[in-house]
Amino acid sequence: MPRHTTFRFCLDPTVEQTVALARHAGAARFAYNQCLRLHLDARERYRARAGHDDDANEDDDADRALVKVPWSRFSLINAFNQWKVSQDAGRRFLVAGSGVAEMEVTGLAWRSEVSAQVSEEAAVDLSRGLAAWTNSRSGKRKGRPVGHPRFKKKNHTTGSFRMRNKTQGNRSSIHIGTGNRPRSVTLPRIGSIRVQEDTRRLRRMIAHGRARILQATITRGARRWWISVTVEAADLHPIAQHPPRLNDNEKGWVGVDRGLHALVVAGTRDGTETLRVQAPKILTTRLRQQRRITRAVSRKKRGSANQRKARTRLARHHLRVRDTRQHFLHQVSNQLVKTHDKLVLEDLNITGIMSNRRLARAVSDGAWGELARQLTYKQHWRNGQVVVADRWFPSSKTCSSCEHVKKVLTLRDRTYTCDRCGLVRDRDLNAAANLAAWAEDHTSTVTDGTGRGEVRDGDRQAAGPDIKVCRRDGTGPHNRVGETSPDDAGTPALAAPAA
């Protein structure tokens, strides 16, 4: 079972179940904030101990060694579990008849009302945020700078929590369908909750041993509760996979050009167009309605019930736009991966293009990055190949016939006319043909006879993005004063989280 996929359903809970879901979402937010507070307090103590190096002795060094900063996921889980049963989390005073008062440590009074997995997963999220922050500061993480994790605000309209699936024998803590309620999902400490969509496909995969539930994420938004069930599924049926290419492996590439006028234009090296999809511009068509709803929100009194209702209408509007766009992108990506086993994408600087205020809305509405992500993992499921061309390869300015590079080509030029050979071709189709030619000239595929090929080339981006990257917990060596390493956490790397 090498692939992971997610099934998303809309929940239809009762009033009691809604209260229980909100309680778990609040517990996840509380655990995240408390773990962050414990981490920051430990760092302050570590800085205070390290600030007395001038008059330090062996005893001070031993005291500084006792200051353990929880950083990894296991150390954060253990730190929170120790705190929630301490007197700092809760205590009460009992006065006897004789007038003598005694203190009783209660810990968190509500900890038995929610599942312990909620706080553990919140600690895991904080650990990932701290690791991303330190890796971004040290240069190990590329892309935009990642800020330090911040405390989460209490919000009665949003929130989320995650639960792992624990199996005891043949019984799972998270299962789909119970008895005569096939459209339901059962969660620990909450029970069976009705869902609105059909769960037949997931239930059949689990019943036939072709899927195993790993975890479930429950989110709240737009006055609705959603559940995303992450499963480890078996490979697709051999009929749905691309047959192996044993001969002529360097041929057959199809370039995919993404644009604003035409969302996708796919073509081969000889200029044959295989697919053209016009950009739907989903956000642009509903922008007038969005502005009207936004003005209604601004007119309402802040904090009133009418403002909450108006915000809900605005949130549902954005949800409909997102769902419509996702549905369209899945249709396009499915059509591409089902008909082509070798796809070439261009490495677009989407973040840089978004800085142009004239193009930002159209680029975000096109969702180029989401389309590339779907093509990558879907092609991997079907034993296909996806490569990414060099970012500085001039696919639009190069003639697909004589390879002459045009110096000036504006966005208004929808037809490419070569100044050397006189080729006249659609601009997007010419770019797709150049991408296909680049892949055939810069890549070589080695197959082992099973259909699973390895793309080899001299360019670092030709193999495409790595879809199985795992970042270990911890932060590495010290970078600045006050930062810690996994050794400072005081928890072995292979230790199990406390119950």
Image (spheres, rainbow, N blue to C red):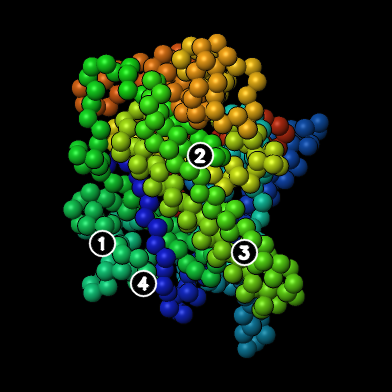
Of circles 2 and 3, the one toward us is 2
Of circles 2 and 4, the one toward us is 2
The residue that disc 4 covers is 194
- In the displayed structure, 130 sits above or below 390; it is below
Amino acid on which the number 1 mark rests in the picture? Arg
Among numbered discs 4 and 1, the one appearing first in the sequence: 4
Gap in Å between the C-alphas at discs 1 and 3? 36 Å
> Which quarter of the rendering shows the N terminus?
top left
Among numbered discs 1 and 2, the one appearing first in the sequence: 1
Of circles 4 and 3, the one toward us is 3
Q: Residue 348: where, in percent of width, then height?
A: 56, 31
Judged from the image, the secondary structure of the residue bearing numbered disc 4 is: strand
Using a 10 Å C-alpha cutoff, classify the residue at mark 1 as few (fewer than 14 neighbours), some (14 to 19) or many (20 or more): few
The residue that disc 2 covers is 262
* Residue 157, label in figure: none
* Residue 289, label in figure: 3
Amino acid on which the number 2 mark rests in the picture? Ala
- In the displayed structure, 247 sits above or below 372; it is above
Identify the residue at horizontal 35%, vertical 43% (top origin).
Answer: 334
Among numbered discs 4 and 3, the one appearing first in the sequence: 4
The residue that disc 1 covers is 200
Q: Residue 443: where, in percent of width, then height?
A: 39, 16
- In the displayed structure, 283 sits above or below 60; it is below
Residue contact between numbered discs 4 and 3, judged by CB atoms under 8 Å: no
Residue contact between numbered discs 2 and 3, judged by CB atoms under 8 Å: no
Amino acid on which the number 4 mark rests in the picture? Arg
- In the displayed structure, 5 sits above or below 420; it is below
Identify the residue at horizontal 58%, vertical 14% (top origin).
Answer: 419
Can the viewer see residue 180 in this picture? yes
Q: Residue 112: where, in percent of width, then height?
A: 47, 70
Residue contact between numbered discs 2 and 4, judged by CB atoms under 8 Å: no
